Image (tube, rainbow, N blue to C red):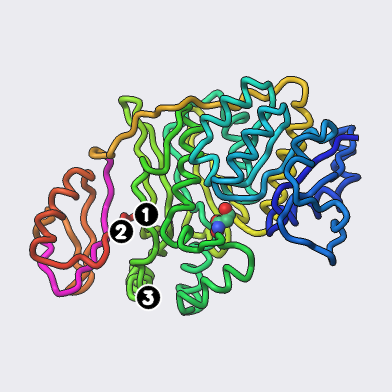
């Protein structure tokens, strides 16, 4: 029998304990080996839980137990989780996690320790909730040069935007429902301000391009500027507003990555990705576009991905799986990247600063396709005359 520990008994940790226990037979049959939850670390007591007898408050009960081979880190954040993960990897234990903050901030360092100690550090659940994305990207698409990845990577904001659009829901009410359903971060501004999506873009970029792209290198805008008016205007033109994370490889090998609201047209694969669902498009030089779709947040979808990693760590317990990236990606500001834009101003405006444009209303227009360099240059001039309420890219 192989013993597992879980650190953190919140939304995800609970789901992992349930899944490992309820599907133990099926998991064991698949692995030809039995996995058992031996310890759960949390500061709180859980007297009503069926796992009450294995709760511990002492990290050493896991770190110093030679019978515990793999640990699911479901603590979250970058303080205790970082310290614990380093110690566990250094002690020769496999660690799996859904903690995107930690992987985005310290992935290169933790993967280097895992490599040195011949153990696995896996984080499938950190991107796309229950969607298998990192493993296919690393394994099944390994023969391809990945040139671009983009998608809806945050379930909470997609849930909020979908509810505002389909049900006319109020932003705050839709967000509190997402919190109630266990989709949102402990601090939901991480969802709303795009930080969670940037962490996921950081992980996807680092894995796809082999060098760590840090969240600070990713220009990040959230959905605070998206109003009900923008949603209605977009809909009247056949678009939906979605928060998109995107990363692409420039011809010189640098990485351009950003997070921003987009108007998504009906011809895009992402148009029909609604509610808590995520959709991620990976572009490879031989395979073309591959789309991954599924529930991007929630207790059990996320637990499904964490447990898949626990099982993979078991399969690779003798010789670690070569999942690795180095530090130090070169980043680009995307000057030559081209988009069309939707712009809304606080007052009626003259859009003729932009060579190609279509007025939607007196204070709202769409531009023709232009490079970021040109758009930024023209916006600097435009902003001297008008107050820009929002400027979103258009994805057709
Ligand atoms: N808060 C995140 C989301 C959880 O809504 O997508 C899953 O990473």
User: Distance of mark 2 from mark 1, alpha carbons?
Assistant: 7 Å
- Disc number for residue 260: 1
Q: Earlier in the sequence, mark 2 or mark 1?
A: 1
Q: Quadrant of ligand 1?
A: bottom right
User: x and y percent of residue 73 in the render?
Assistant: 67, 44
Q: Is residue 290 visible?
A: yes
**Residues at circles 2 and 1 in contact by the CB criterion of under 8 Å:** yes
Within 10 Å of disc 2 (Cα), the crowding (few <14, some 14-19, many 20+) is many
Question: Residue 15's quadrant in the figure?
Answer: bottom right
Residue 360 disc label: none
Q: Is residue 396 visible?
A: no
The disc label shown at residue 228, or none: 3
Whole-number angstrom distance, CA of label 2 to CA of label 3? 14 Å
The residue stretch that appears in magenta: 337-351
Left or right: where does residue 98 sit relative to residue 29?
A: left
Q: Is 390 on the left-hand or right-hand side of 178? A: left
Secondary structure category for the residue under label 3: helix
Residue on which disc 2 sits: 392
| Dot 3 beta carbon under 8 Å from ligand 1 | no
**Some atom of ligand 1 lies within 8 Å of the CB belonging to the residue at label 1:** no
Q: Are marks 1 and 3 in contact (CB under 8 Å)?
A: no
């Amino acid at each position: 029998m192989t013993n597992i520990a879980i650190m953190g008994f919140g939304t995800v940790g609970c789901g992992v304990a349930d899944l490992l226990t309820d599907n133990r037979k099926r998991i064991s049959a698949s692995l030809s080996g039995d996995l058992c939850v031996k310890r759960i670390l949390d500061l709180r007591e859980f007297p009503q839980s069926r796992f009450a007898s294995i709760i511990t408050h002492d990290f050493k009960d896991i770190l110093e137990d030679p019978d515990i081979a793999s640990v699911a880190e479901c603590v979250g954040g970058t303080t205790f989780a970082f310290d614990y993960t380093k110690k566990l990897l250094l002690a020769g234990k496999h660690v799996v996690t859904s903690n995107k903050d930690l992987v985005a901030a310290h992935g290169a360092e933790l993967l280097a320790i895992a490599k040195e100690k011949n153990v696995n550090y896996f984080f499938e659940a950190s991107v796309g909730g229950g969607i298998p994305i990192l493993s296919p990207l690393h394994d099944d698409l390994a023969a391809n040069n990945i040139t671009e990845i983009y998608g809806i990577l945050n379930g909470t904001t997609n849930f909020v935007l979908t509810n505002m659009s389909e049900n006319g829901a109020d932003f705050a009410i839709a967000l509190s429902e997402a919190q109630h359903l266990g989709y949102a971060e402990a601090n939901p501004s991480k969802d709303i301000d795009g930080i969670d999506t940037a962490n996921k873009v950081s992980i996807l970029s680092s894995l796809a391009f082999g060098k760590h792209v840090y969240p600070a290198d990713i220009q990040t805008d959230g959905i605070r500027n998206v109003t009900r008016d923008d949603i209605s205007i977009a809909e009247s033109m056949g678009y939906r507003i979605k928060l998109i994370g995107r990363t692409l490889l420039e011809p010189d090998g640098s990485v351009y990555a950003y997070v921003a609201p987009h108007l998504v047209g009906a011809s895009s694969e992402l148009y029909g990705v609604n509610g808590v669902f995520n959709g991620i498009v990976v572009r490879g030089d031989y395979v073309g576009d591959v789309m991954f779709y599924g529930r991007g947040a929630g207790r059990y979808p996320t637990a499904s991905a964490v447990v898949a990693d626990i099982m993979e760590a078991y399969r690779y317990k003798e010789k670690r799986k070569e999942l690795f990236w180095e530090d130090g990606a070169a980043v680009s500001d995307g000057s030559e990247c081209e988009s069309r834009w939707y712009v809304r101003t606080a007052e009626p405006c003259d859009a003729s600063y932009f060579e190609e444009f279509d007025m939607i209303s007196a204070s709202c227009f769409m531009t023709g396709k232009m490079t970021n360099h040109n758009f930024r240059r023209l916006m600097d001039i435009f902003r001297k005359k008008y107050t820009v309420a929002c400027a979103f890219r258009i994805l057709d």
